[in-house]
Image: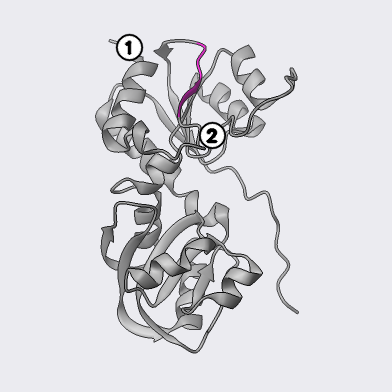
Amino acid sequence: MSVTVTQISDFLNEWAPWETAEEWDNAGVVVKSSETVTGVLCTLDITHAAIEAARAAGCNTIVSHHPVVFRAMKRFDASGVAETLLREGMNAVCAHTNLDKAAGGVSETLARFAGLEDVQGTGGFCCLGTLPQPQPAAEFARSVGRALNTAVKYTKGQETVRTVCVVSGAGGDMTADAVALGADCLLTGEASHHEGLDSLIPVIAATHYATETMIAGVLAQRLGERFPELKTEVFAGADPFSYIAKE
């Protein structure tokens, strides 16, 4: 019996309800070409490279974290990613802010990758975890960089941290939330100059890509467990940015 796009959507809704996505978000079945699913490729971003990988693997459905159509489209182009999906007969199912907030979702996955223990969701974008032992923010930042294989920037490096608020992706504006939750550090993907300057606690920013790309593997694992007859693939993609080390 074949798996359908509706079944994929319903399963994701059980885990990360679509109704919990932010109003400005675009989560759900964003592109639909066929109800029947031949295979699923899971990734952070739907790009031309991801489409090529799905085609090569015989997958007509891509499940991503970032929506393939996010802002209002005012112009359509045959070379566009969404248009290419339709031309290739592919589907796109995108679980974005609803998956950020879900138990076992993006932020909680990041917390575990970062080595935090007793990870707990808070019902919003933040989750909390603790380090096995208190350590300076700079030391924790270095360990995050090693765990995620990424460049990291941080503030207040000498301050000791133990309870960490984790917000995957662009969470630099949530330092006040972190403080209110009792955290003494914020781990996120992106933080602006002024967010770092104004924060009362250390902020560690480990890039948007590196703090979220691991969710592709989690999506594939969960889909494979729910639909064992379904071919599931993981496409890592790439950070759109390259980084130059401080000299």
For the point 60% across and 20% down, the residue is 85
* Distance of label 1 from label 2 (alpha carbons): 25 Å
For the point 40% across and 57% down, the residue is 110
**How many labels sit on residues?**
2
Colour scheme employed for the rendering of this structure: one colour
Quadrant for the N terminus in the image? top left
Question: Is residue 40 highlighted in magenta?
Answer: no
Nearest the viewer among 16 and 131 is 16
Q: Is residue 107 positioned above or below 77 on the image?
A: below
Specify start and end residues of the magenta stretch as a single range: 28-33
User: Residue 245's spot in the image, x, y percent?
Assistant: 70, 72
User: Residue 166's spot in the image, x, y percent?
Assistant: 40, 63
Nearest the viewer among 81 and 51 is 81
What residue is pinned by disc 2? 67
Quadrant for the C terminus in the image? bottom right
Q: Is residue 25 left or right of residue 183?
A: right
Amino acid type, label 1: Ser
Amino acid type, label 2: Pro
Residue found farthest to the bottom: 158
User: Tag 2 or tag 1, which sits nearer the N-term?
Assistant: 1
Nearest the viewer among 20 and 186 is 20
Q: Residues within 10 Å of mark 2 (few under 14, many from 20)?
A: many
Q: Name the secondary structure under disc 2.
A: loop
Q: Residues within 10 Å of mark 1 (few under 14, many from 20)?
A: few
Residue 115, picture quadrant? bottom left
What residue is pinned by disc 1? 2
